[in-house]
């Protein structure tokens, strides 16, 4: 569960960084670099969305495993 939350937070860290890189590259006239960063930004947004879509089910599964003596929640 902590891993999922950390990944979600990290994706948003990456999103902010790519936005800054795009702005910087465009300001410096490096349109090719900006374009690559824009493409990667879309991947980061997609991953953040995927993680957001799965956080509830991950939490639910974590809680079920935490209550099950035969399973460990960290698996
Ligand atoms: Fe990422």
Image (cartoon, helix red, strand yellow):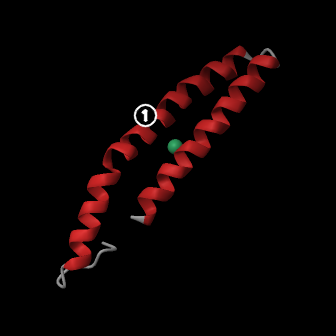
Q: Position of residue 7 (x, y in %)?
A: 48, 53
**Residue 64 locus on image (x, y percent):** 21, 70
Q: Observer-nearest residue: 40 or 62?
A: 62
Question: Is the N terminus in the top left, top right, bottom left or bottom right quadrant?
Answer: bottom left
Q: Position of residue 31 (x, y in %)?
A: 70, 14
**Above or below for 51 versus 20:** below
* Residue at x 45%, y 41% (from the top left corner): 48
Q: What is the count of numbered marks? A: 1
* Location of residue 27 in the rendering, given as x and y in whole percent from the top left corner: 80, 18
Q: Which residue is mark 1?
A: 46
- The quadrant in which residue 16 appears is top right
Q: Nearer the viewer, residue 36 or 5?
A: 5
In the structure shown, which secondary structural element does the residue marked by tag 1 occupy? helix
State the quadrant of the C terminus.
bottom left
Q: Callout 1: 10 Å neighbours few (<14), some, many (20+)?
A: few
Where residue 47 sits, quadrant-wise, is top left
Give me the residue at 82% from left, 19% from top.
28
Query: Quick check: 26 left or right of 2?
Result: right
Q: Which residue appears at 68% of the width and 22% of the height?
A: 33
- Residue 65, by quadrant, is bottom left
- Figure check: 63 above or below 25: below
58, above or below 21, in the image: below
């Amino acid at each position: 569960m902590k891993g999922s939350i950390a990944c979600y937070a990290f994706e948003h860290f990456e999103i902010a960084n790519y936005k800054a890189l795009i702005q910087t590259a465009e300001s410096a006239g490096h349109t090719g670099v900006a374009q690559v960063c824009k493409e990667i930004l879309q991947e980061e947004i997609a991953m953040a969305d995927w993680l957001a879509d799965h956080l509830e089910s991950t939490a639910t599964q974590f809680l079920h495993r935490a209550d099950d003596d035969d399973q460990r929640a960290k698996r």
